[in-house]
């Protein structure tokens, strides 16, 4: 089944196992990744062609189809489609896989908990894997990586369904900028991840080794092969995370193949596509589209998680992922989409700028700039970034992706401010402000006092383990945060030396530090 793509000219017509088990391996919960990943930041480390291995595993016969409830329509389920493409040896007799099955048995409702995300994305993942002739077990990797959460973010900077690192993503042509992070986009990230897995399989000629290398890095797997008398995954000395990662994928596949084995609750999922891909001619304003199509803007962002802003990127990708059942409504709405549209410019405030001078320079209004950037006053600071509408149309509330929410920042207290008014202005909570600034909520604020305003959900709390050679400056540069913030979060002096093994708390934006 193909995923429909509609070409819509603008103005005429217009888609759980652990969140990134890298670091959550030891705990059977579904909280965001809070520890470092093993995966190498070098996606394509060369492996000599002399490293060869056994031929590809034969595809076993598909298991017998489960009994069909006569009261349920006989539409092929996604699970039967998955089972029909399984091609790996699940090795349920091996201790590591048995241990993973025991771990799964402790959370039999795992698939039910991720059902909303599975409904959106899993059919597309299975289709993409099948089109490449890969074992369909590969389509389950994002459950292991992120519990199918495109907003999942790890301490090493990996993001999205497939938990792609920036270097890996760039190598495979994924765009990451102020407007868009393709690592969170289900289409771009899936293409890149499958390209990478195909590359790894071509090097190792073994799917288990390719999956291990996806987690640990190709160079680490290659070194393990050189040290080992054999080259089977089960014989290699690999990091503990990787030794659990591969068995957990196999255990999940085995449990889906035979849910009664561990009492896994398997929700009904159709193999029909959940979204349609609409090609666009140019940038569009999402709030305008949502209003015309009577579609909640949050729903647009659930299907387009790669978008950072309330408009599609001016330089592409020029497409929109729309829920299948709303595709016609969106097509009809685009007939009345303003032909002149809205183009958005990213502007960095310079010393001496005012909202009035910026509005005049860009042929827009102060009200439009304030609305587009959620500004309640006229105060702007040098170095801040503003979203500028470049026509006189009323842009509505075009802000950051609401599912990413608002990034944190600093705020200088003015007369009349209170923790409550500031929390309302920045879509955060009084408790969050108190924690971020170590305040006594009973004491009044001082005019001129500078407060740190935490992000609502664009920021993720991660725990970083200091490595040899690390410094506050190096860590700050790596994660796009400030040295003084790291010091404040961890009650350090900026001049303190860090010790290898020391644990630090960091608040890192999942939007990324992209220009």
Image (cartoon, rainbow, N blue to C red):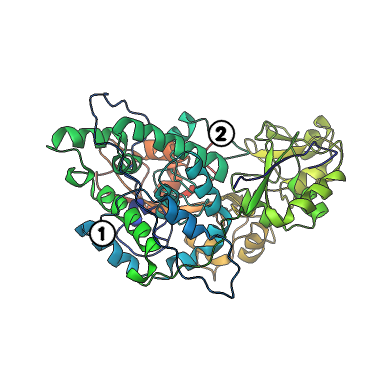
Residue 396 location (% of width, % of height): 80, 50
Measure the alpha-carbon separation of dots 1 and 2: 40 Å
**Secondary-structure class at tag 1:** loop
Vertical position of residue 285 compared to residue 67: above or below: above
Q: Residue at x 44, y 53 (%)?
A: 84
Residue 297 location (% of width, % of height): 71, 55
Number of disc labels: 2
Please give the residue where the numbered disc 2 appears in the rendered image.
175
Residue 239 location (% of width, % of height): 23, 46
Please give the residue where the numbered disc 1 appears in the rendered image.
92
Q: Is residue 453 in sight in this rendering?
A: no
State the image quarter where residue 430 is shown.
Answer: bottom right
**Mark number, residue 470:** none
Instruction: Identify the mark nearer the N-term, 1 or 2.
Output: 1
Q: Are marks 1 and 2 in contact (CB under 8 Å)?
A: no
Left or right, 379 with respect to 158, comes to right
Left or right, 306 with respect to 59, comes to right
Q: Residue at x 40, y 35 (%)?
A: 198
Residue 202 location (% of width, % of height): 35, 31
Q: Nearer the viewer, mark 1 or mark 2?
A: 1
**Secondary-structure class at tag 2:** loop
Vertical position of residue 413 compared to residue 165: above or below: below
Left or right, 460 with respect to 398, comes to left
169 vs 432, nearest the viewer:
169
Q: Residue at x 38, y 65 (%)?
A: 29
10 Å neighbourhood of mark 2: few (<14), some, or many (≥20)? many
State the image quarter where residue 314 is shown.
Answer: top right
């Amino acid at each position: 089944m193909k995923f429909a793509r509609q070409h819509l000219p603008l103005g005429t017509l217009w888609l759980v196992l652990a969140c990134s088990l890298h670091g959550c391996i030891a705990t059977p919960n579904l909280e965001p990744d809070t520890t470092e990943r093993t995966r190498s930041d070098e996606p394509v480390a060369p492996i000599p062609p002399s490293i060869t291995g056994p031929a590809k595993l034969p595809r076993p016969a598909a298991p017998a189809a489960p009994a069909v409830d006569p009261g349920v329509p006989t539409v092929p389920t996604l699970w039967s489609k998955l089972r029909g493409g399984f091609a790996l040896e699940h090795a349920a007799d091996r201790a590591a896989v048995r241990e993973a099955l025991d771990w799964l048995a402790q959370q039999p409702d795992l698939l039910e908990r991720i059902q909303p995300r599975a409904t959106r994305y899993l059919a597309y993942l299975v289709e993409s894997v099948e089109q490449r002739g890969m074992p369909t077990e590969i389509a389950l990797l994002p459950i292991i990586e992120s519990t199918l959460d495109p907003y999942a973010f790890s301490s090493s900077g990996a993001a999205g369904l497939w938990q792609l690192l920036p270097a890996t993503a760039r190598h495979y042509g994924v765009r990451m900028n102020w407007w868009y992070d393709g690592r969170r986009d289900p289409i771009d990230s899936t293409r890149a991840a499958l390209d990478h897995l195909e590359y790894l399989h071509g090097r190792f000629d073994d799917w288990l080794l390719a999956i291990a290398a996806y987690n640990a890095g190709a160079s680490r797997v290659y070194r393990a092969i050189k040290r080992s008398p054999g080259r089977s995954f089960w014989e290699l000395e690999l990091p503990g995370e990787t030794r659990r990662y591969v068995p957990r994928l196999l255990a999940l596949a085995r449990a889906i193949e035979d849910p009664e084995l561990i009492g896994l609750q398997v929700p009904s999922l159709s193999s029909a596509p959940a979204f349609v891909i609409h090609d666009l001619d140019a940038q569009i304003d999402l709030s305008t589209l949502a209003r015309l199509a009577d579609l909640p803007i949050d729903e647009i962002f659930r299907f387009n998680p790669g978008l950072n802003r309330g408009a599609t990127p001016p330089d592409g990708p020029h497409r929109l992922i729309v829920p299948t059942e709303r595709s016609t409504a969106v097509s009809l709405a685009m007939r009345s989409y303003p032909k002149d549209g809205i183009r958005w410019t990213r502007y960095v405030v310079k010393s001496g700028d005012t909202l009035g001078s910026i509005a005049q320079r860009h042929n827009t209004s102060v009200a439009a700039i304030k609305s587009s950037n959620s500004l309640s006053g006229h105060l702007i600071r040098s170095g801040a970034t503003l979203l500028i509408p470049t026509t006189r149309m009323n842009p509505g509330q075009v802000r950051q992706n609401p599912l990413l929410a608002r990034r944190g920042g600093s705020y200088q207290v003015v007369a009349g401010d209170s923790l409550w008014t500031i929390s309302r202005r920045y879509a955060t909570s009084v408790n969050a402000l108190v924690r971020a600034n170590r305040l006594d909520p009973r004491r009044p604020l001082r005019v001129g006092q500078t407060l740190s305003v935490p992000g609502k959900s664009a920021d993720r709390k991660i725990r970083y383990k200091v490595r040899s050679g690390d410094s506050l400056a190096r860590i700050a540069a790596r994660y796009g945060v400030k040295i003084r913030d790291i010091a404040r979060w961890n009650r350090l002096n900026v001049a303190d030396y860090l010790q290898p093994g020391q644990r630090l708390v960091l608040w890192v934006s999942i939007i990324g530090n992209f220009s």
